[in-house]
């Protein structure tokens, strides 16, 4: 229905259709007004007086430029009656009398004189309405007497005219500029992607059409010539093409036609600049609606999670609506409305919804805002804070689909801490209908991206996120000093390739600053438990125990448990990174289970607990010491593969359900009652780097690293470990590591690995191209190594869903 009304507005009277059909192109007044309206739109947007590009009415300027007020005529009318409307309709439908025809002739003479400068001065004096608030361009109906009711945007400024091209180019750095272009036919029709250079044929072949108002869009070099990109409306078609800045033209009178005479000149002349003054706007004042807002904004390093989610949701709605042509231009919708209303449980309203509000309502709300908070108010604020902390982009979108959403200027600013007024239901909202589509795979997201931007969450690491810059690519964690900040809502705007790597351009608001950055799509990260921010007490405890990987079994079990955790979260078997017990694998890998007589036990008694405590605290018997020695021999043989096979066979408990890593206490007899997560799959082993790279595409890869001292200690965060380097080198042995990424440093292929060495866990870069060999030293055959790379024996768990 709305589109039908808009279509009807372009055909408001049969005279309009006849008039437009009879014209080959717009007349000079319409062309000048179109250029002036476009200049105003571009300048206001550049000065941030309009938050988005806004179209203003060119027809208003045609109707009002150079218009003289009649003596005694009131500039404004404050009433509008049905009689006014009927009189206007009768006037339109009636045949024109002689006086009206004379008035139309005068108006035609006025219109013939209108220039871009006249239009701009009219806008500065009278203001200018938006395009949809006035008649269409080319309308021949008389302006109604009640036109003063049409809302206009007030504007203050002055018109600057310059004659020299050099001065115009200087001003163009700060302001859009209009000019006049010398138009020759048929050259103007044949420009295409080339450069318009004016008359190009023999005398008599080119015809001077006249001057046309244009907008200068930018200077550049084209095939060695200085050219200017200009926007022109010619024969009712708007286009942009290149105009030579070096070409001079002159023509003489052709068969006495003085209009064909042009003094030597460039193709662009008569430059006009609108200098619009900034007026203190209510919108700017609204961003400081209450002192509490200023204090709250100053106290926050960045917007909270609800505000970030709402901002992304509002932007997605704005973009989707303009793509579907539900909005003619990009329209900002209120993110704060979504913060205030998402996940709100509405109470049933008794009786019809209110449709009016009074001065008393306004005063009551102002008193409420200014009064000290009662205990009930503070409790309500705490509840609202809990609600806000749960808000996601999905919640915001569903809120908009259910309730509609107001424009940004119709609601409180983002971050407003004032209470929503009781009459907020009267604020106009745009109805939005649709559904939320969620996808888990990047491939599915790229498919959705064909239809418009896609919301997503980005893993943010600091200081890596701060160091990306405009031209860099964010690849997540890069070193041991990296800190995991958390997930941030972003908008994916597009996907491209940079140096052969697929990257996504995302829009992110981080630390109150909105920016675009490139994010690598081929980078797989592993967030180890020491980087998680759960309970600080628990993390410190885990770190102090886990990092004490004093023997090979504990190192192998730690790598295996982390590979399982990572594989499960990548396959969406776990919703978040879950720590599984490495100590369980140490206690159970390579254990030969004896057949159990009778059904397995299913209960745990106090007697069981007491028996275990007595057993733990009693001195060890000789038989127990022999059993401990056997267990030590078993543990010395444990590899990452053994640990993974144990998990596939027995399942694995979460870390908090089993003893800590390095525990020397005997496993209690009722350990079988402890819940375990079933894990099904197979162990995949690879011997070559090429096969390891293929496995790395699906997630981190376990491996063994040849460790040499002191080189391993000297590698540091930014260096590259490349094995033995001198005579003082000693071979430490193989260490289980996790290969998390492959990159190039100074042209050399390196792998980023996480290693636990000397009770210290760190990331190091390991050369993938270095080959080495060592010989027996003083008869020590353990120092002999056949030619090999630094990383060997690659392994991954391939889980089945």
Image (cartoon, rainbow, N blue to C red):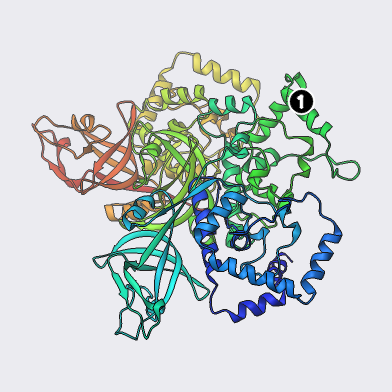
Residue 707, percent across and down? 23, 35
Find residue 53 and report its image quarter.
Answer: bottom right
Instruction: Return the residue nearer the eye: 201 or 44.
Output: 201
Residue 740, percent across and down? 36, 44
The residue drawn where x is 67% and y is 64% is: 135
Q: Is residue 437 visible to the viewer in this orientation of the structure?
A: yes
Instruction: Return the residue nearer the eye: 19 or 569.
Output: 19
> Compared with residue 415, is residue 127 higher up or lower down, i.e. above or below?
below
> Compared with residue 331, is residue 484 higher up or lower down, i.e. above or below?
above
The residue drawn where x is 61% and y is 34% is: 285
Instruction: Return the residue nearer the eye: 207 or 548.
Output: 207
Query: As drawn, is 725 to the left or to the right of 168?
Result: left
Query: As drawn, is 50 to the left or to the right of 220?
Result: right
Crowdedness of circle 1 by 10 Å Cα count: few (<14), some, many (20+)? some
Residue furthest out toward the right:
351
Quadrant position of the N terminus in the picture: bottom right
Q: Which residue is mark 1?
A: 368
Residue 127, percent across and down? 61, 50
The residue drawn where x is 39% and y is 29% is: 631
Find residue 223 and report its image quarter.
Answer: bottom left
């Amino acid at each position: 229905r709305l589109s039908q009304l808009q279509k009807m507005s372009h055909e408001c009277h049969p005279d309009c259709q006849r008039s437009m059909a009879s014209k080959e192109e717009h007349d000079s007044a319409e062309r000048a007004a179109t250029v002036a309206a476009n200049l105003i739109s571009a300048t206001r947007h550049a000065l941030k007086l309009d938050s988005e590009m806004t179209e203003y009415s060119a027809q208003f300027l045609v109707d009002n430029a150079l218009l003289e007020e009649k003596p005694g005529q009131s500039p404004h009318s404050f009433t509008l009656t049905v009689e006014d409307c009927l009189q206007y309709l009768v006037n339109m439908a009636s045949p024109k009398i002689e006086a009206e025809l004379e008035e139309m002739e005068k108006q035609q003479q006025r219109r013939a004189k209108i220039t871009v400068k006249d239009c701009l001065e009219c806008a500065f004096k009278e203001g200018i309405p938006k395009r949809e608030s006035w008649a269409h361009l080319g309308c021949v109906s008389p302006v109604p007497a009640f036109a003063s009711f049409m809302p206009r945007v007030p504007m203050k400024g002055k018109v600057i005219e310059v004659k020299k091209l050099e001065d115009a180019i200087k001003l163009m750095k700060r302001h859009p500029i209009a000019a006049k272009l010398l138009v020759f036919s048929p050259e103007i029709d044949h420009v295409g992607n080339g450069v318009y250079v004016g008359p190009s044929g023999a005398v008599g072949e080119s015809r001077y059409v006249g001057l046309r108002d244009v907008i200068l869009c930018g200077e550049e070099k084209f095939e060695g010539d200085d050219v200017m990109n200009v926007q022109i409306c010619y024969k009712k078609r708007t286009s942009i093409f290149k105009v030579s800045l070096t070409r001079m033209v002159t023509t003489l009178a052709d068969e006495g036609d003085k209009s064909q005479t042009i003094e030597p000149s460039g193709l662009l002349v008569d430059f006009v600049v609108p200098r619009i003054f900034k007026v203190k706007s209510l919108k700017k004042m609204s961003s400081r609606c209450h002192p509490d807002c200023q204090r709250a904004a100053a106290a926050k390093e960045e917007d909270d999670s609800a505000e970030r989610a709402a901002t992304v949701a509002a932007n997605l709605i704005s973009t989707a609506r303009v793509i579907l042509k539900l909005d003619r231009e990009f329209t900002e919708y209120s993110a704060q409305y979504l913060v205030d209303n998402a996940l709100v449980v509405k109470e049933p309203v008794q009786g019809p919804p209110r449709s009016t509000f009074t001065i008393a309502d306004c005063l009551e709300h102002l008193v409420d805002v200014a009064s000290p908070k009662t205990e009930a108010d503070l409790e309500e604020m705490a509840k609202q804070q809990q609600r806000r902390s749960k808000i996601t982009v999905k919640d915001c979108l569903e809120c908009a689909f259910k309730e509609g959403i107001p424009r940004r200027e119709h609601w409180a600013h983002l971050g407003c801490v004032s209470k929503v007024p009781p009459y907020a239901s009267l604020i106009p909202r745009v109805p939005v209908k649709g559904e939320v589509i969620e996808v888990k795979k990047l491939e599915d997201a790229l498919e959705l991206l064909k239809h418009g931007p896609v919301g997503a969450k980005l893993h943010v690491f600091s200081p890596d996120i701060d160091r990306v810059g405009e031209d860099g690519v964010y690849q997540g964690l890069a070193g041991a000093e990296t800190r995991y900040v958390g997930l941030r809502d972003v908008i994916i705007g597009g996907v491209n390739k940079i140096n052969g790597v697929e990257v996504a351009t995302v829009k992110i608001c981080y630390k109150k600053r909105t920016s675009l950055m490139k994010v690598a799509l081929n980078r797989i990260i592993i967030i180890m438990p020491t980087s998680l921010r759960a309970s600080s007490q628990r993390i410190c405890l885990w770190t102090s125990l886990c990092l004490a990987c004093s023997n090979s079994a504990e190192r192998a079990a730690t790598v295996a448990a982390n590979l399982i955790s990572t594989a499960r979260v990548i396959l969406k078997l776990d919703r978040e990174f879950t720590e599984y017990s490495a100590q369980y694998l140490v206690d159970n890998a390579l254990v030969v289970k004896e057949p159990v007589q009778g059904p397995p036990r299913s209960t745990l008694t106090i007697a069981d607990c007491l028996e275990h405590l007595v057993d733990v605290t009693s001195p060890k018997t000789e038989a127990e010491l022999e059993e401990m020695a056997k267990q030590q021999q078993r543990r010395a043989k444990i590899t990452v593969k053994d640990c993974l096979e144990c998990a596939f066979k027995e399942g694995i408990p979460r870390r908090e359900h089993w003893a800590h890593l390095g525990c020397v206490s005997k496993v209690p007899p009722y350990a079988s009652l402890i819940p375990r997560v079933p894990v099904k799959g197979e162990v995949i082993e690879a011997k070559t780097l090429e096969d390891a790279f293929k496995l790395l595409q699906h997630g981190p890869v376990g491996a063994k690293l040849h460790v040499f001292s002191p080189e391993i200690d000297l590698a540091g965060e930014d260096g590259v470990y490349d094995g033995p380097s001198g005579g003082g080198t000693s071979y430490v042995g193989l260490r289980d590591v996790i290969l998390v990424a492959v990159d190039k440093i100074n042209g050399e292929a390196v792998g980023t690995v996480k290693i636990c060495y000397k009770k210290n866990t760190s990331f190091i870069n390991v050369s993938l191209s270095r080959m080495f060999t060592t010989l027996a030293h003083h008869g020590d055959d353990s120092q002999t190594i056949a030619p090999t790379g630094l990383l060997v024996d690659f392994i991954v768990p391939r889980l089945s869903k």
